[in-house]
Structures are given as C-alpha cells and as structure tokens.
Image: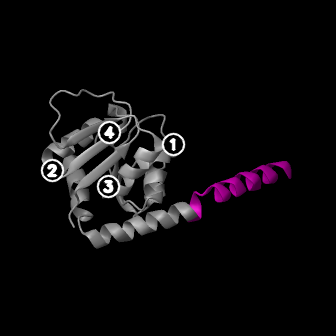
Amino acid sequence: ENIGKIIYVGGVIPQKGCERMVDVARKRPDIEFRMIGKVGISVENLPANVVLCGEQDKKTVETELAEADVFMFLSNFLGEGFSNALAEAMANSLPCIVTDWAANADMIEDKGGVVVASADNGDLDEILCAIKKIADKETRRKMGEWNRDRVLNCYSQKIITDMYVDAYESLLSK
C-alpha cells in the first residue's frame, strides 16, 4: 500500500536532478529509488536503496515502469523541453513528482502529481513533502489515471500530428 519504488528514466546526470534524487533517497531509506539510463553521477557512497540500472531496452523500461509506484523527474536541464520519459511514465498511469521546469508542470498540472521548485534551488523538504502528499494508494491511482487520460487526449500521435497539420495549413493560408 505504501510507496515502495520510485523510478526515473533518462540520463543519470546532475542536470536531470539525479543527485538530488539520491539526497531524497538518503532521507527515505524505506523506498527503493531506481534510475534507468546512462550513468553520469558519482557512484561512491550511494545509499543502499538507490539502484542504478544503467541503459536498458524498451521492454525492460516498460517492465520497470509497470512495477513502480511513482515517477520522479527533478530536471533542470537547459536542453529539456517536452520530456518523452515523463510522457511515457504518464502513459503507464504513474503519478509524478516533477520540477517546475520546461513543460513538466504543464504536462501534469495539479492533477497528475506534485510540482516542486527547480532541482538546482529546490528545497529537499519540499520534495519529501511531495512524496507524503501522494503516499495514499488511492490518491496515486487517481493521479495515474488522470495522467494516462492526459497522454491519450493531448499527446497521442494522432493529436500531435493533427496539431502540426493545422498549424501548417494556417501558415499557408496567410
């Protein structure tokens, strides 16, 4: 019933908030924190509840997402825009804890998880409070369902393709 596993997918680098995620893991030894992606952070002195999975194939990522309770995305990466990893987590009905960075807050709004300050200046307590806010299993289920619906209704291939075509046709008609 409790949060047992928090997952992150992407480059395991400081700019994506991975070091901050390790800080959170130190404060929450009761939760397993799994990071999937090429590792670019120090692996020395990692707490036992942090698992660096390395780069994985699509099927393994899908399995990991299906087994997780929460997706955490604390990015402050300047090259970030629309996060495919976040959209994939949302499509897998995961509630999300994200930074107010790039499109993150717009993607989950206040219904698909919790938005915290940017990881470079964010308060560790704010992230810990976000975990507490979604500790209830029913709350996580509702957030996850909202996220899945959001992806289906706003970010599916057909929806995005139609938006591109509409924008293109609008420009041509001017």
Q: Which residue is mark 4?
A: 17
Q: Position of residue 70 (x, y in %)?
A: 32, 56
Q: Which residue is mark 2?
A: 28
Residues rendered magenta in the picture = 153-174
Measure the alpha-carbon separation of dots 3 and 4. 18 Å
Measure the alpha-carbon separation of dots 2 and 4. 16 Å
Query: In the figure, residue 48 lies in which quadrant?
Result: top left
Q: Is residue 137 magenta?
A: no
Are circles 3 and 1 on residues that touch, CB within 8 Å?
Answer: no
The quadrant of the rendering that contains the N terminus is bottom left
Give the mark, 1 or 4, whose residue is nearer the N terminus.
Answer: 4
Measure the alpha-carbon separation of dots 3 and 1. 24 Å
The mark lying in front, picked from 2 and 4, is 2
> Which secondary structure type mostly characterizes the magenta part of the structure?
helix
Give the mark, 2 or 4, whose residue is nearer the N terminus.
Answer: 4
Q: Could you tell me which residue is drawn at 38 percent across and 31 percent down? A: 38
Q: Which residue is mark 1?
A: 81
Query: What kind of residue is marked 3?
Result: Ala
Q: Is residue 159 magenta?
A: yes
User: Can you see residue 99?
Assistant: no
Q: Between residue 144 and residue 121, name the one nearer to us.
A: 144
Query: What kind of residue is marked 1?
Result: Gly
Measure the alpha-carbon separation of dots 3 and 2. 16 Å
Give the mark, 2 or 1, whose residue is nearer the N terminus.
Answer: 2
Measure the alpha-carbon separation of dots 1 and 4. 15 Å
Query: What kind of residue is marked 2?
Result: Arg
Q: Position of residue 45 (x, y in %)?
A: 14, 30
User: Can you see residue 33?
Assistant: yes
Measure the alpha-carbon separation of dots 2 and 1. 29 Å
Q: Between residue 79 and residue 141, name the one nearer to us.
A: 141
Q: Secondary structure at mark 2?
A: loop
Q: Which residue is mark 3?
A: 68
